[in-house]
Amino acid sequence: MITPKFVAARAILAGAIALFGMHSVWAGIPIQHWTQPSGVRIYLVESPAIPMVDVQIDLDAGARRDPIDKPGLANLMAASTANGVRASGAGPTLDEHQLSEAWADLGASFGGSASADRMSFGLRSLTYPDLLDKAVALAARQLGEPSFPEAPWLRDRPKMIASLKEANTRPATLAGRAFSQAVYGSHPYGSETTEASLLRTNVEDLRALHAKVLRACAAQVSIVGALNRAQADALVAKLLARVPQGGCTAQPAVPEVAALAAASEVRIPFASAQAHVLVGQPGFKRNDPDFFALTVGNHILGGGGFTARLTEEVREKRGLTYSVYSYFAPGMHAGAFTIGLQTRPDQAEQALTLVREVVTKFVEEGPTEKELQAAKDNLIGGFALRIDSNKKLLDNVANIAWNGLPLDYLDTWTQQVERLTVADVRAAMARKLKPARMATVVLGAP
Amino acid sequence: MKHPFHLSGARWAAPVSAFALAASLTIPCLLLPLSASAGEVQPAPAATLAQQFTLKNGMTLIVKPDRRAPTAVHMVWVRVGSMDEVDGTSGVAHLLEHMMFKGTPTVKAGDFSRKVSALGGRENAFTSKDYTGYFQQIPSAKLEDVMRLEADRFANNTWTDEVFAKELEVVKEERRLRTEDKPHARLHEAMDAVIYQADPYRRPIVGWMSDLESMTADDARAFYRRWYTPTNAAVIVAGDVDVDAVRVLAEKYYGSLPVHALPQRKPRTEPEQTGLRRLDFKAPAEQAYVALAFKVPGLKPAGLPATAAAPTDATSEDALALTVLSAVLSGYDGARLPRALTLSDKPVADEAGAYYGLTARGPQLFTLYGIPAVGKTATEVEAALRAQVALVAKDGVTEAELTRVKNRWVAGEVYKQDSVFNQARLLGVSWINGFPLGADQLLLERLRKVTAAQVQSVAAKYFGDDALTVATLLPQPVDATRKPRVPAVGLRH
């Protein structure tokens, strides 16, 4: 066990951040983009130094599109592609064991999952030609010809239910769920898999969803690794060769998250060593023109680690908590703005009062010139740290692709931060945050 | 879910696994081909060998260039962790780690973090049983600035009793967060205290709460003066840097730090265990859990001669074979434990696995664990886990399994290069455990030579009752109406 001084409570979810040409070697990140005849959109950054490649396929089939009575279906479907593939042409049937052994033998990995917005599949492989060809061929089968056998599904479902029940004994789970309900109401961003929803779901649902969403014309593929454009083009063609190429139709609109009309407060008794305090409200959508001002504002308020205001006030000055944080979660819809902390139960009220004071004052007054400059120094100076591995680059490239950001987004990001003023940040935070209409959850206080 | 593929952004300060696979000792540039692609591999241009130096005051410097991006990671590793504490002040190594952010005569409390932030940097620190580490990730042009700051606090850390008292409260909250509300964490804390009687691994890294309650500022100051000396530390720099330039800077900022004698590390040898130990642990939970810890040998530096061809001793050979055994049992999705216990037609467990650390400053354990499936008991899971080891002891493992786990390690060596931070981290762990640069490469070569017969042999040799401790979580209902646990007053200083 390792115990670090400070745990960043949540990754900054705001997404891609950028390089400004401050280093001669790294004047920019060239993202190559093209579309294949099938309609699949490809985004490539060549990274030749290490003989490996990471590929991410994204589809507009995230949890926000789950049937209302089957929340979690998209994630289950994506993950269940590992349960087996059906026979096809020269390709034999492979069960889950044969699949996992094949991946292990290749020293590669492939898998799927779904977040609220996206369904995603990821492949990581070495680029030695023989190995890569086999890995791509296997991934293509798992992607296009999963068998969704019933036996593993029926076997695994009780495990998922048991795991849900276990999670329900944990204070953090219960506090998070109450907060999610208070912020999202009936919006799909707040939906959760339950025992009942799992019992309603069967392999026919998985098969039907797969048939509906796995289409080349709906896919965007982000690639970072030791491949050139021609190799990447061939890889994608092979990877998606076993899914239907056409047949993409417009998706129905998903409603927006409703703003909160009034403050709410939920108190949950719980016998834990710490009380859990959550405060927040719907935040903003990723395409909001205030994106940069809000990102910087939150960095100063509670996102910037040891130097953030909330950390300074709640942890450093008073020793009330190990971790206090705030973050926005912008996506296709207004993901929650969340402030969270844990503290000894008898200190919960003091901490909550303090948090409210800090956020109210920040929204009213905005940051100081000094705070804004410190945030800019950190964000601009440290930009390269956000893209200094293939994995980080892939996250950024996929984010640019998904959100339709300009291909030079990484090259102009620091300029976007640099031009912000105190008034910009204050105005943006005041537009989005309404301290008098926030939801509060306190679990485990006396 | 199987094949979890995490697509969210990386969380910084990813915790270091205390159960890192053997092959995750650092391998800076090893690009051994998989058998399927022998002869096709070219060395990667980004991969440059790490270099190691001793500064004039005895401090170690390790530099690993990686020129892919204009960033660097700078770490200081101190060979001191919770295993160097004594009873009554458990947790002081970790508490001191927190205090190191609280100032020097020239950098006041909070300014260390503000200065690193202003450089565009990220920073944190970590403490384990074996070591304490501090790091900054920075634009490579700012390396000198963080070296100056880090060298200053290494030699001149100071703070008031009042600042200490506040940070102690933070650490108590950390203990509540990490341990007290987490049944598995509490079980493993209790289990360590049953596994070990004399060995300092018996104490939790974060410290017993009563020791934290009675901790004084002078306890932390004394620990700092005792253990923080250049001969007990290493500076590790990885990223877009020039080796010679880093060496000059390191001599300038670290090479001039004063040295004092390192205290004698007294042996606290664990008496031989002579029978099965059992521990029942009750906590609010829905699912039971069982862990079986067997005392087994680890690999020490003397067990890894400088050439792969040189013979090693029988105990070290066993340690290498145990690493292969753990991978065969649970090193991939379809490995033996998940396949037999959780993926069978009638699963006995919802989760099952094994881990073994191979290298550490202290003694080693080989641990099996599982969560019973609905309708199954911890006793049944315990039996099933032991049956899988017994099966290896009886029938051995297949060549296909051996090849599979070795191929995965070799591929993993390539993937590890993607993170500069992890390259530095692995160099640090290797140094802490006393291994020379390049040991990782030797280690992988040795692991590739482990035979099926050796794996079968260790499975038969080390998994009896006499060196075993079994801990079982007995789930208790969650009583939502029970009063919150408010700590007793009057214990604080």
Image (cartoon, coloured by chain):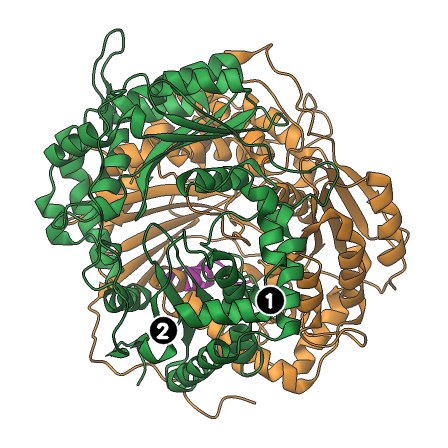
Chain colours: A green, B orange
Inspect this view and state whether residue B244 appears. Answer: yes
Label 1, secondary structure: give it: loop
Residue found at x 51% / y 57%: A292
Task: Tell me if residue B203 can be seen.
Answer: no
**What secondary structure is marked by label 2?**
strand
Q: Quadrant of the C terminus of chain A?
A: bottom left
Give the extent of the magenta segment. B187-198
Residue located beneath label 2 in the image? A279
Relative depth, front residue between A292 and A177: A292
For residue A29, what is the image quadrant?
Answer: top right
Residue B306 placement, left or right of A36: right
Q: Earlier in the sequence, mark 1 or mark 2?
A: 2
Indicate the chain on which mark 1 is placed. A
The answer to whether residue B364 is left or right of residue A275 is: right
Q: Which residue is mark 1?
A: A421
Q: Report the residue at 50% width, 65% height from top.
A: A298
Q: Residue furthest left?
A: A200
Q: Which residue lies most toward the bottom here?
A: B490
The residue carrying pointer 2 sits among few (fewer than 14), some (14 to 19) or many (20 or more) residues within 10 Å by Cα, namely many
* Percent of width and height locating residue B316: 60, 34
Which residue: 56% across, 21% down? B449
Q: Main secondary structure of the magenta part?
A: helix
Horizontal arrangement in the rendering, residue A81 relative to residue B164 (left or right): left
Residue B435 lies, with reference to residue B409, above or below; the image says below
Q: Amino acid at mark 2?
A: Val
Q: Residue at x 61, y 75 (%)?
A: A368
